[in-house]
């Protein structure tokens, strides 16, 4: 595998892992809600700092 193809492969893998990890919280909240005695809508705002950090990091890295 040549270098550009390897870079594209790593970028695609990282992109997948990034979106996958961002979506894990939304799915985990379904189980966490009853365990913590909170509603889905009460727990979901805790993801906001992660989305803000993601956006800020995207701007910094180009």
Image (spheres, rainbow, N blue to C red):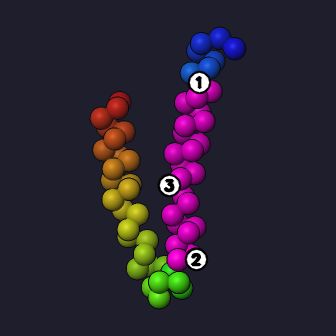
**Residue designated by label 2:** 31
State which tag comes first along the sequence, 2 or 1. 1
Q: Left or right: 35 with respect to 46?
A: right
Residue at 38% x, 54% y: name it.
51
Q: Secondary structure beneath disc 2?
A: helix
- Residue reaching furthest to the bottom: 37
* Mark 3 / mark 2, whichever is N-terminal: 3
Q: Nearer the viewer, mark 2 or mark 1?
A: 2
Report which residue position mark 3 lands on. Answer: 22
Q: CA distance from mark 3 to mark 2?
A: 16 Å
- Number of callouts: 3
Asked if marks 3 and 2 touch (Cβ < 8 Å), the reply is no
Main secondary structure along the magenta-highlighted residues: helix
Q: Residue placed at 56% from the left, 21% from the top? A: 7
The answer for how far apart the CA atoms under marks 3 and 1 are is 21 Å
Looking at the rendered image, the disc whose residue lies closer to the viewer, 3 or 2, is 2
Q: Considering the image in quadrants, where does the C terminus appear? A: top left
Work out whether mark 3 precedes mark 1 in sequence or the reverse, and give the earlier one: 1
| Tag 2 and tag 1, C-beta contact below 8 Å | no
- Kindly identify which numbered label has been placed on residue 30: none
Using a 10 Å C-alpha cutoff, classify the residue at mark 3 as few (fewer than 14 neighbours), some (14 to 19) or many (20 or more). Answer: some
- Would you place residue 35 above or below residue 58 in this image? below
- Residues under numbered marks 3 and 1 in contact, where contact means CB atoms less than 8 Å apart: no
Q: Examine the image and state in which quarter residue 9 appears.
A: top right
Where residue 8 is drawn, which disc sits there?
1
Within the magenta stretch, is there residue 9?
yes
Specify the segment rendered in magenta. Answer: 8-32
* Element on which disc 3 rests: helix
> Which structural element holds mark 1?
helix
Residue 3 sits in which quadrant?
top right
Residue 53 percent across, percent down from the top left: 33, 50
């Amino acid at each position: 595998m040549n270098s550009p193809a390897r870079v594209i492969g790593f970028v695609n893998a990282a992109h997948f892992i990034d979106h996958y990890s961002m979506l894990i919280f939304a799915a985990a909240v379904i189980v966490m809600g009853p365990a913590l005695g909170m509603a889905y809508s009460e727990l979901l705002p805790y993801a906001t700092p992660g989305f803000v950090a993601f956006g800020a990091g995207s701007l910094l890295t180009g």
